[in-house]
Amino acid sequence: MPRVLILHTGGTLGMSGSPLYPDAYATRLTEAVPELEQLATIETRIVFNLDSSDMGPPHWEALAREIDASREDFDGFVIVHGTDTMAYTAAALSFALVDLGKPVILTGAQRPLGALRTDARRNLADAVELATRAIPEVGICFDGILVRGTRATKSHANDYRAFDSPGTAPIAKLGVDIELSAGLRQPVGDYAFRPGFDARVMMLHMTPGLSPQLIEPLLKGGALGGLVLAAYGMGTVPASKPDMTAMVARAVEAGVEVLVITQAAGKVDLGLYENSRRLADAGAIGGGGLHVEAAVTKMMHALANFETSASRRDYLLRDIAGERG
Ligand code: ASN
C-alpha cells in the first residue's frame, strides 16, 4: 500500500457550530472517512486547527518543514486546509519545496464533514487517491479537479467549484476515471528546500485617482520589502497626474522590489505602452502571467532567500514552478 501523510491545518472541513469554528473531531479524520484506509496507509498529524484566514508565512514555513522532515517516509502528502487562503499556501509550498518529486495535495471543503450534502468526503478521498499517484507537483484538489499550486485561485465563495487556475488547464480531472494531464511538471533539478518567507510585502491594486502620497509613507524605514503592483491590462499605471511611475522609482530607490502583475487575464508586457515602459525604466519587474497568490508568496520568498537585489530580481523573473503561466 502507498503511504500518505495527512497534515491537518483547519478550515470548514473540520468545523462545527454556528458561527463555524475549528472543532476537535478533525483529529479523527480516518474514523469519519474510513474508506481513506482502502487507498493508502495513512498517518494523520494535526499541525494547526485554524480558520485559514489566520494562516500566513510562519504556518507555511512550519508545513514545509513537516513535509521536508518526512519526505523519505511517505509516497505523498495531503494537506487539509481552509479554502480562504489555500491558494496562498499552495503557492508558498511550491516555492519552498522545489522539485520535491512527490505529490503534495491540498484540499478542504465548503461544507463541514459532519454536514448533510458535504463535499468534504469526496474531496478527501480524491486528494488521498491523487497523493498515491505519480504527480510530482503541489496542487489543489477540489470538486473533481486538481489545479497547479502556483496557478490556483479561490474563484467562488459559496460554490462547490471553489478553485480555478485561470489561463492554465487543470493538471488532473477526477471523473469515473482519473485523467492526469500530459502537462504535469517533472522535476528539473535536485530537490531544493527553502522554507523562509519575509512578510514585508503588500499588494497595491491600481484604481483610477489613487494618490501616490498614500503609499509614500510606507516606503520609509524598511517596513516594506516588496510591492506587488496589480496594474491595468498589459501593465499600465497613470504616468501623468497622479504619476504612479515616479512613486515606483522612489520605492525602488528605497530598496523595495516592485513586481508588476495584471488585474486582467493574460500576461504583462512592460515594453508595449509608454505607461508600462516607464514602470520598467523605474526599475519594476514584469511578472508575466503571475496571479496574485503566487506573486505575493514568491515576493516573500525572494526577500527571505536572496541577499542582493540582483539575485532577487533574477529569481522573480525566472519561472520556478509554473507560476508565470
Ligand atoms: N473560512 C474557511 C477557511 O478558510 C472557509 C472554508 O474552509 N471553506 O478556513
Image (cartoon, grey):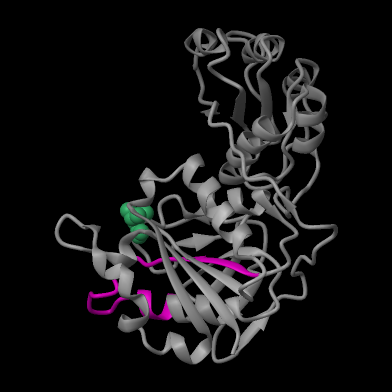
Please tell me whether residue 304 belongs to the stretch shown in magenta. no
* Residue depicted at x 70% and y 15%: 252
- Residue 266 in view of the camera: yes
Q: Nearer the viewer, residue 45 or 245?
A: 45
- State which quadrant residue 167 falls in: bottom right
Q: Nearer the viewer, residue 256 or 281?
A: 256
Residue 200 lies, with reference to residue 11, above or below; the image says: above
Residue 296 lies, with reference to residue 17, above or below; the image says: above
Count of all numbered marks drawn on residues in the image: 0
Q: Nearer the viewer, residue 97 or 154?
A: 97
Q: Which residues are magenta?
A: 103-123
* Residue depicted at x 15% and y 62%: 17
* Residue depicted at x 65% and y 83%: 179
Horizontal arrangement in the rendering, residue 294 relative to residue 190 (left or right): left
Q: Position of residue 126 (x, y in %)?
A: 50, 80
Q: Position of residue 303 (x, y in %)?
A: 66, 30
Q: Name the quarter showing ligand 1.
A: bottom left
Q: Position of residue 193 (x, y in %)?
A: 70, 50
Q: Residue furthest right?
A: 189
- Quadrant housing the N terminus: bottom right
Magenta: main secondary structure equals loop
Q: Position of residue 184 (x, y in %)?
A: 74, 69
Please tell me whether residue 111 belongs to the stretch shown in magenta. yes
- Residue 111 in view of the camera: no
* Residue depicted at x 63% and y 40%: 295
Residue 320 lies, with reference to residue 160, above or below; the image says: above
Q: Nearer the viewer, residue 182 or 105?
A: 105
